């Protein structure tokens, strides 16, 4: 029984599946508990949970209750992750009454998990909310957690930045820079998925808080190997599944809202349809 069949034997028939993807329309906590009991293990988890700021897809909780809830999810992810696995968690900011206007969720959460924090990545973007009485927010955090600080996947050559200022600079006759490019550092400048007339991103779906594919592609290529199983417990619009499908990784996702599951299904089926046309008519592309 392969890894995908094993998961289906534990969780039952998925909402949607293809050769590399299975999506469940269910609460991720319920699914993770079942996976933990069965002994199923994933290689990498990549996700962005609700930020507890009143979006249409979340029920706002008191801040401490929210942190406790997310910490419980994080520990379940730890329990279903392989010993050399990783967890990439994207979070933003929230208001903490009596404490602060825009408190980074990382400050409240980072050490409340069994994972080890390997590094914090800053995701910087150009477009975003405008502000008049404080600085316009233009970054979010990605916490790169691992289970073993001496054994984890890091494919640096696959995510090197080719934009090198002095690519031909030499020292003692040897190139100083890797010919594939430079280390992208821990600050990533990647555009958000925008919406609105004349400014909507080409990849935009009907989901109100969509991961940019460029961001997830860097994470998938850098922190998961080909044929690895990637988990996204808050699937949203399905960006993680799309990127995994395009880059020879398997993925499993949970999404509690049926309408968002429909968005994911439509998105992935559209990609498969396009790829099929390419196979049949390669000269058109």
Image (cartoon, rainbow, N blue to C red):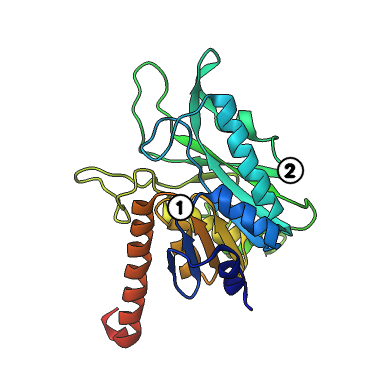
Locate the C terminus and report the quarter of the image it occupies.
Answer: bottom left
Most extreme residue toward the top, as rendered? 98
Q: In this view, does 257 lie above or below 65?
A: below
> How far across and how far down the image is residue 221, in percent?
56, 62
Residue identified by numbered label 2? 114
Near-viewer residue (189 or 97):
97
Nearer the observer: mark 2 or 1; the answer is 1
Residue 168 visible in the displayed image: no
Near-viewer residue (72 or 225):
72
* Secondary structure beneath label 1: loop
Relative placement, left or right, of 203 versus 22 is: left
Near-viewer residue (285 or 101):
101
Q: Which residue is located at x 50 percent, y 30 percent?
A: 93
Q: Is residue 40 above or below residue 56?
A: below
* Secondary structure beneath label 2: loop
Q: Which residue is located at x 57 percent, y 50 percent?
A: 30
> How far across and how far down the image is residue 96, in percent?
52, 20
Q: Which residue is located at x 40 percent, y 49 percent?
A: 257
Relative placement, left or right, of 78 versus 266 is: right
Q: Which residue is located at x 74 percent, y 43 percent?
A: 114
Residue identified by numbered label 1? 255
């Amino acid at each position: 029984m392969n890894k995908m069949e094993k998961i289906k034997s534990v969780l039952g028939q998925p909402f949607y599946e293809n050769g590399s993807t299975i999506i469940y329309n269910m609460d991720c906590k319920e699914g993770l508990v079942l996976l933990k009991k069965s002994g199923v293990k994933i290689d990498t988890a990549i996700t962005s949970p609700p930020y507890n700021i009143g979006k249409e897809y979340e029920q706002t909780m008191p801040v401490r209750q929210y942190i406790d809830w997310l910490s419980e999810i994080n520990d379940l992810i730890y329990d279903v992750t392989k010993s050399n696995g990783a967890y990439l968690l994207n979070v933003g900011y929230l208001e903490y009454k009596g404490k602060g206007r825009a408190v980074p969720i990382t400050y409240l959460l980072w050490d409340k998990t069994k994972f080890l924090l390997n590094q914090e990545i800053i995701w910087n973007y150009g477009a975003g909310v405008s502000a008049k009485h404080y600085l316009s927010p233009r970054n979010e955090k990605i916490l790169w957690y691992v289970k073993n600080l001496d054994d984890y996947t890091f494919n640096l050559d696959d995510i090197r930045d080719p934009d090198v200022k002095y690519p031909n600079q030499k020292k003692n006759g040897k190139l100083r820079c890797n010919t594939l490019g430079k280390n992208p550092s821990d600050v990533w400048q990647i555009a958000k998925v925008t919406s609105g007339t004349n400014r909507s991103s080409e990849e935009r779906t009907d989901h109100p808080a969509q991961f940019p594919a460029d961001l997830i592609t860097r994470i998938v290529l850098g922190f998961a190997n080909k044929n690895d199983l990637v988990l996204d417990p808050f699937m949203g619009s399905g960006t993680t599944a799309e990127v995994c499908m395009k880059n020879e990784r398997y993925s499993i996702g949970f999404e509690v809202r049926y309408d968002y599951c429909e968005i994911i299904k439509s998105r992935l089926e559209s990609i498969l349809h396009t790829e099929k046309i390419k196979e049949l008519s390669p000269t058109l592309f």
